Amino acid sequence: DAGVIQSPRHEVTEMGQEVTLRCKPISGHNSLFWYRQTMMRGLELLIYFNNNVPIDDSGMPEDRFSAKMPNASFSTLKIQPSEPRDSAVYFCASSLKPRTGGRTDTQYFGPGTRLTVL
Amino acid sequence: AQSVTQLDSHVSVSEGTPVLLRCNYSSSYSPSLFWYVQHPNKGLQLLLKYTSAATLVKGINGFEAEFKKSETSFHLTKPSAHMSDAAEYFCVVSDQGSNTGKLIFGQGTTLQVKP
């Protein structure tokens, strides 16, 4: 099992540029989460997909952020235009949510993308 | 609403001595609780989880945690610290109320292990 795969691992860009972060969840998982980690705010959930459908995007900071999940094996998080305050480590996580409710299963995290906006 | 509080932002121990990282939770439901570890410049790795089975949960690398409902605690322990245990540790509760799978993270405890 390759685990959750994220790319790129590091991204340095200039303010105003578009940034796209990519995630491949663990095969068979039906839930996908995007998080942002900063020193000031810790880990924040940005958006959550279940069966490729966005369920909760209340954590998305503003309209500059958008996320898609076109199929079960791929998701993107896009920032356009990027700003220096977007500099953070962005994590993708996946899990297998039971179809009929019940306990939430474990989330498995990718290695993260370290984004620096100059 | 669920919440989790890690009582120490920084813990320092000597190699070979016991580790105790404290966590208290608040939940209206029977919670699922997790401990994750994050080594520098790495992603989060699951150490262990509690999901209403045995209250003493054993995880990887010799860590364990005990769920105490009466104290609303889920402290992480290890009998003997190793240098490789130096990392950031997160106590996490699952938001069972909304059944979304959303995790609520504590602020983290940095574990320093001195030789």
Image: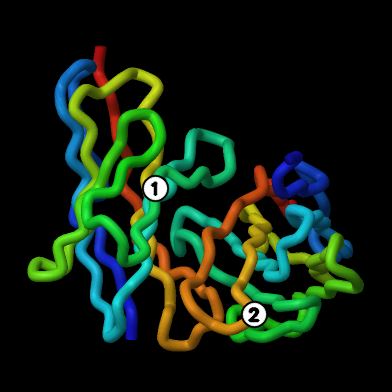
Residue type beneath disc 2: Arg
Q: Quadrant of residue B12?
A: top left
Kindly report the distance in space between the C-alpha atoms of the residues bearing marks 2 and 1: 23 Å
Vertical comparison of B44 with B105: above or below: above
Q: Residue at x 57, y 36 (%)?
A: B41
Characterize the local packing of mark 2: few (<14), some (14-19) or many (20 or more) Cα atoms within 10 angstroms: few
Vertical comparison of B105 with A55: above or below: above
In this view, the mark in front (2 or 1): 2
Vertical comparison of B16 with B30: above or below: above
Vertical comparison of A53 with B46: above or below: below
Residue type beneath disc 1: Leu
Q: Is residue A116 left or right of residue A66?
A: left
Q: Is residue A51 left or right of residue A107?
A: right
Q: Chain of mark 2?
A: A
Q: Residue at x 15, y 22 (%)?
A: B17
Q: Give how far across and how far down residue B47 sits, in percent.
A: 42, 43
Q: Which residue is mark 2?
A: A99
Q: Give how far across and how far down residue A17 sits, in percent.
A: 87, 62
Q: Chain of mark 1?
A: B
Considering the image in quadrants, where does the C terminus of chain B appear? top left
Q: Residue placed farthest to the left in the image?
A: B70
Q: Which residue is mark 1?
A: B48
Q: Is residue A43 left or right of residue A29?
A: left
Residue B107: tell me if it is visible. no
User: How many numbered callouts?
Assistant: 2
* Badge 1 element: strand
Q: Give how far across and how far down residue B5 sits, in percent.
A: 25, 64
Query: In front here: A48 or B41?
Result: A48
